[in-house]
Amino acid sequence: MFGAVNKGNLVLSVENDFSDLDDYDYSGEHTSQLPGDDDPSVQAHTANEDRQAEEPDAEVKDEWSQQQLVVGPSRDDFAAEDQLRQIRDRLESVLRGNWNTGDPRFYYGGSFGKRTMIREAYDLDLVVYFPHDIQHSVRDFYIAVEQRLRTSQYKTVRHNVAIRLPYDGGFHVDVVPGRALANDYVYANLYASERDTTRQTSIKIHIQSIRDGGNQDIIKLMKVWRLRHQVPFGSFVLELAVAQALKGCRKTSLEDRMWDVLLYLRDKYSDARLVDPANSNNVVSDDIAPSEKYAVQSAAASSCQKKRWQEIVW
């Protein structure tokens, strides 16, 4: 477990960037390719002694051990590769067939498609899009999917646009029903149960924006930070905040970029306007409770006072 310490570097070593997760199938075909056995890892080290002002500084006395945080599922985990495939297959069998509107299409969403999964805390997102040329409302589909899952003995919890299925051990599946807007299934209307309204968005565009954004490493580290400090920070909001914090950033080191994100959360997050990249009418930050904004801001402020990356991330 203990390795050589390289003072001054915060390193994210990604041996498997989930490039094999192209099973987020834009054509709608069901493929079940999932990550293989290679596990990427996050390695963190002490902060740079040359950091200035508020950054982790020269008072770093204790060299600390490398800490491995695997990013991606292991075959020994509850939600190992075969089990995840089986979970999806079982859900598809429940939700496929006997619809007078025609069968929906199924896609992987969330951290699988975005390649931002961390092993210590991840879930499975299953997107369920019904055909566009039907008369039923997206709310009708949401309720119908919910009822079919309950009939099949799944415990369901409404989680805004998702129907959450909790499993033992903290793992859960988010089923996201929607109605496609066209035959390409790129855009869809989702039912936002918290406000009893409909939202137009594109989960495919969400995934592509993360893949193309170049911030997956920071998003993974921020997920570790969120987990370790128990910050109420939804993944979609976290991703938007990271993108906003690093917009136009030319810095390349993980230390500098991670530090910029923390400063943004401390100084600007509470008043930030975070917008859905697939629909500018969806102002995501409007849905964040003030108490949650304050919790994120406070956690970031606390982290900015630390002197070692070990304390900041872990």
Image (tube, rainbow, N blue to C red):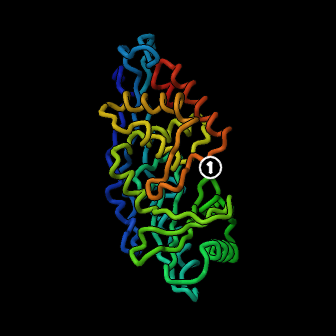
Q: Position of residue 88 (x, y in %)?
A: 51, 69
Q: In terms of depth relative to the viewer, which is nearer, 294 or 6?
A: 294
Q: Residue at x 45, y 33 (%)?
A: 261
Q: Quadrant of residue 138 in the image?
A: bottom right
Going by the numbered disc 1, the residue's amino acid type is Asp
Q: Residue at x 63, y 34 (%)?
A: 295
Q: In terms of depth relative to the viewer, which is nearer, 171 or 214?
A: 214
Q: Quadrant of residue 176 in the image?
A: bottom right
Q: Residue at x 53, y 55 (%)?
A: 282
Q: Is residue 256 above or below residue 290?
A: above
For label 1, the crowd category at 10 Å Cα-Cα, with few meaning under 14, some 14 to 19 and many 20 or more, is few
Q: Is residue 249 above or below residue 170?
A: above
290 sits to left or right of 1: right
3 sits to left or right of 266: left
164 sits to left or right of 206: right
Q: Position of residue 143 (x, y in %)?
A: 67, 73
Q: In terms of depth relative to the viewer, which is nearer, 26 or 136?
A: 136
Q: Residue furthest front?
A: 281
Q: Position of residue 201 (x, y in %)?
A: 49, 62
Q: In terms of depth relative to the viewer, which is nearer, 237 or 267?
A: 267
Query: Which residue position holds label 1?
Result: 287
18 sits to left or right of 174: left
Q: Position of residue 127 (x, y in %)?
A: 51, 67
Check disc 1 and report its element: helix, strand or loop. helix
Q: Residue at x 43, y 28 (%)?
A: 259
